[in-house]
Image (cartoon, grey):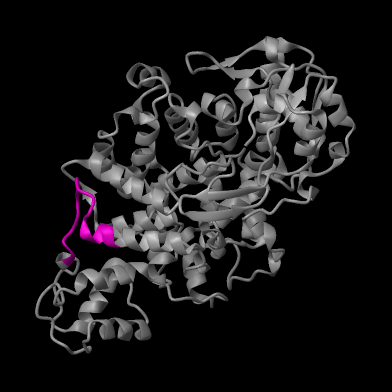
Amino acid sequence: MPTVARLARASEPTLLKLVRNRRQVLMGAGAAVVATGAVGSAVAVLGGGDGIAAALADSATSTRSPRDAGAFADRDASYTQSLGDSINLGAAGLMDSAGAAAAAAAKATPTNPNLLSRDPILHMLRRTTFGPSRTLVDAAGKLGVDEWLEQQLNPGKVDDPVATRALAAFPTVAMSTAQIRRTVKDGDWQAQYELGQATIARQMWSNRQLFEVMVDFWSNHLNVTNPFDGGWDVRTSYDNDVIRKHALGKFVDMLKASARHPAMLRYLDNAASDRRSVNENYGRELLELHTVGIDGGYVEKDVRNSAYILTGRTVSNEGEFRYEANRHWIDPVKVLGFKDKNGSRSKGLDVGEKYLSYLATHPATAKNIARKLAVRFVCDAPPNGLVQRLADTYLEHGTAIAPVLRVLFRSQEFWIATGMKTRRPLENFVATARALGVAPGSDTRAGVEGLYFMTQRFGNAPLAWVPPNGYPDVAAAWRSAHATLALWNAHRALIGGYERGLSYPKVEGLVGKRPGTTGPYLDSLADRLVFQKVAEPHRKALLSFLSAKDSTAVRNGSLGGKLEYVAPLLLDSIYHALR
């Protein structure tokens, strides 16, 4: 991405070209190359009211929608597939409770059948957690769908002892910016690496699983990559004070918090934006990614006005948010239906707050967030009827997220969509650890650090997506042979306990009471690792791999030394890959 200084030296024709052309990103996510379309914009520097800005105002881009600029290609299937309400999952509509919706969907025939068990407890846990564990399946089964979901929607009331103990290995995750600046060497990425590693620990061991899923969702929606140069002292605070604080609260509060946070302001260059040299990067992403979306109806002139409104929001030398009135651009502004005289530099921050409230409550923002939630929890191209239902709830409840999730879980579309999502590599990896029962150990910090470096190999380290649009959440984005091979190797590393410092179950102990013959033993192993039996052709293939028959006697827990090879095959399979 071009730097501000470099663009400031560019010629006017070059600047015009940069603004006209949408950003193209071919992102090498580790070894797994993920091709993304123009999901953001090039950084552009706009003069304060004449010169380049005037030329831009007169250009053809002033009234042109960014989506029509010729290079946009969202990686979200619900954007690229114009299927709308023609998508029929086999059941639709809102019920009085999640349990009732699950029961109704169970009686329907899915239009996209697959090999995953349609057991409602398993489906719920695959979608609302980072993967079932044997203990969690049993506990959720006793509570029932409605009570378990309601507990998860109130995470402060859920005890979390294992994750709390594990987080002690990463002391900077509880620190403020000022504390990190006193603890970490200037510019050192220690706190950012600890944040990424602690994120894995939370996903693996927290009892507040739905909360962690939503933290991941919002971390991608309001993405600030981790680590990055400007985040050494402030990225941890962004996680705590923006994402985690508001993950199940109101989006308007989260959006306003992000727009004042030094990590966001540095990452999208607003900290350097000034009325004499206005940087449009954050102003554009605020519209394109954070709120109304690429099809929200704004044009390039709106982008410039968005950038003007945000001038003055910067970062102090101590890494704290600061509004500098003398840097704020004044004159009337208009973005979509928002208008303000914007005549006072001292009141520029207030204008920005009103603008953010307007965007957060815009119907297009409601639709954008509702669609992304449906993509996350239901399928890659969710029905428009479901999306609209969620968007209406979002607006009716003043951008509160918990009511939207309650409606989502009361929707038959959620319960009928078993197996219609593919786990991203990180989710697959964490789900493996959870299924196996990997636990904190003698050196939790070193063990989790090793796991973190594994996630880098398959291009999905937590919080580490570099462009501002966040990790893609559709199956097509992760079709990479290299990433798949790296993930399969990670399955074997977890089963073998290769990363020292954590507690790993012995592979011979995965099956409790050992069946006497090989066929039933494989059934028990599948139930332990993927929580269901596998289809008969797959069962026969595993027996063939073992050179055994269904009735072949099991003489020892290791299946003659082959168990350490059979167990990963189950985790490599579609039964574990889908959610």
Q: Residue at x 39, y 22 (%)?
A: 176
Residue at point 40% right, 19% down?
186
Q: Is residue 16 above or below residue 408?
A: above
Residue furthest to the right: 58
Q: Is residue 537 visible?
A: yes
State left or right for residue 309 relative to residue 181: right
Which sits in the foreground, 535 or 475? 475
Residue 44 at what x, y percent from top left? 72, 31
In this rendering, the answer to whether 210 lies above or below 109 is above
In this rendered view, identify the residue nearer to me: 237 or 95: 237
Residue 528, x across and y down, in percent: 26, 68
Which residue is rendered at x = 70% and y = 69% of the image? 86
Q: Is residue 336 visible?
A: no
Depth check, front residue: 192 or 8: 8
Please determine whether, in this image, residue 521 is positioned above or below residue 260. below
Q: Is residue 544 above or below residue 111?
A: below
Residue 396 locus on image (x, y percent) = 64, 43
Left or right: 83 with respect to 432? Answer: right
From the viewer's perspective, tell me whether residue 371 is left or right of residue 437.
right
- Number of on-image labels: 0
Residue 350 image-quadrant placement: top right
The quadrant of the rendering that contains the N terminus is: top right
| The quadrant where residue 81 appears | bottom right
Q: Quadrant of residue 433?
A: bottom left
Magenta extent: 492-507
Q: Relative to 358, is 482 on the left or the right?
A: left
Find out whether residue 420 is within the magenta segment.
no
The residue shown at (23%, 84%) is 519
Quarter of the picture holding the C terminus: bottom left
Residue 16: give x, y in percent of width and height.
81, 34
